[in-house]
Image: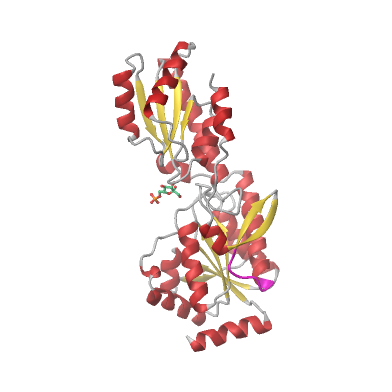
Amino acid sequence: RCLLNLRYIKINMDNKIKSIGVLTSGGDSPGMNAAIRAVVRTCAYHGLQCQGIFRGFQGLMEGDFKEMGARSVNNIINKGGTMLKSARSEEFKTVEGRKKAFEHLQNANIDALVVIGGDGSFKGARELHKEFKIPIIAIPGTIDNDIFGTTHTLGYDTALNTVVEVIDKIRDTASSHNRLFFIEVMGRDCGHIALNAGIGAGAEEILIPEENLGVDRLLESLRRSKESGKSSSIVVISEGGKIGKTVFELKDYVEENLSEYEVRVSVLGHMQRGGAPSCFDRVLASRFGVKAVESLMDGKSNFMVGLRNDAIELVPLEKAIKGSTQVDMELLRVSDIMSI
Ligand code: F6P
């Protein structure tokens, strides 16, 4: 530990980062490749070495590294997923696992890390930084948009567009057959995707974890919808919704209580995580990558890059981990008005 700390002091005394490692961890999201590209090319621009670390923290513990230059990230800005692959690692949650990871970093002469992922990945990065003082900057990448300190995470905008596009198609069937559709979207603990895609796709009702609408209010709302002359309806439900029923149980319950409705369920699932990133996500990834590398060069560590008021800012990693995001509840009111 003592020796490791000496290395830390050396890094900070001459403040020279010569080689940066980049990895993606946790659930993939569109824009991760664009962020890898941005990190690699910013390193190349500044004459730094860059090593791609495969399979997230698991690959870090196994020394699964590959040197990357500006040309090794050709033609990936438009690709979903992550060329570096991603993994969830139990072993990295142990000190022994992280020690292994640090030894591989030392052997490969990697001075600093850029970690692209969600808050689980940030916790791993925080521990590595705490124990071994390796400089780290995190880039928020998850479709859920549930990271404090940034108005947008990488992949969120793309996922919204994917969900809206799919609901538009489902609407064709809903209106042709006078049906009610329950559409479950991702968002383990938060309703950003459901709320925004729901408004964008013109949903009649939106169920999010932040608000317990209750089944009876849902029935009431569907009844009103029918009375107002609507022949079909779309209800968007966040997977983390607190209504106390699965989307399939909800279908049965509504059909039992509102016999005039024929209900179909669509669980959108992982299609929301794939596909080419939107222009917004590509630009955001490029800005995040440049800021991450240049912050490390500047001697900064233990921060996340975030977007606020269209500027890229550094947010203390601890704050990003501990803080929670809020959905804009005014959007629920907007949705209510729109679905009159
Ligand atoms: O990436 C976040 C997320 O999409 C959540 O909304 C969802 O609950 C989870 O990933 C599912 O991921 P996996 O199937 O990879 O465990």
Is there any visible trace of residue 286 in the rendered image? yes
Foreground residue among 328 and 23? 328
Query: Residue 266: horizontal and vertical position, in percent?
Result: 38, 32
Foreground residue among 195 and 70? 195
Q: Is residue 323 magenta?
A: no
Query: Residue 69: horizontal and vertical position, in percent?
Result: 61, 67
Looking at the rendering, which quadrant does residue 17 occupy?
Answer: bottom right
User: Measuring 38% from the left and 35% from the top, which residue is drawn there?
Assistant: 243
Question: So how many labels did they put on this image?
Answer: 0
Foreground residue among 239 and 23? 239
Query: Residue 162: horizontal and vertical position, in percent?
Result: 51, 38
Foreground residue among 147 and 48? 147
Q: Is residue 190 above or below residue 212?
A: below
Indicate the quadrant containing the C terminus: top left, top right, bottom left or bottom right. Answer: top right
Query: Residue 12: horizontal and vertical position, in percent?
Result: 64, 81
User: Measuring 65% from the left and 50% from the top, which residue is drawn there?
Assistant: 283
- Residue range of the region highlighted in magenta in the rendering: 297-303
What is the magenta segment's predominant secondary structure? loop
Q: Is residue 299 magenta?
A: yes
User: Measuring 47% from the left and 44% from the top, which residue is drawn there?
Assistant: 190
Q: Is residue 94 above or below residue 218?
A: below
Q: Is residue 42 above or below residue 311?
A: below
**Left or right: residue 23 compared with residue 90:** right
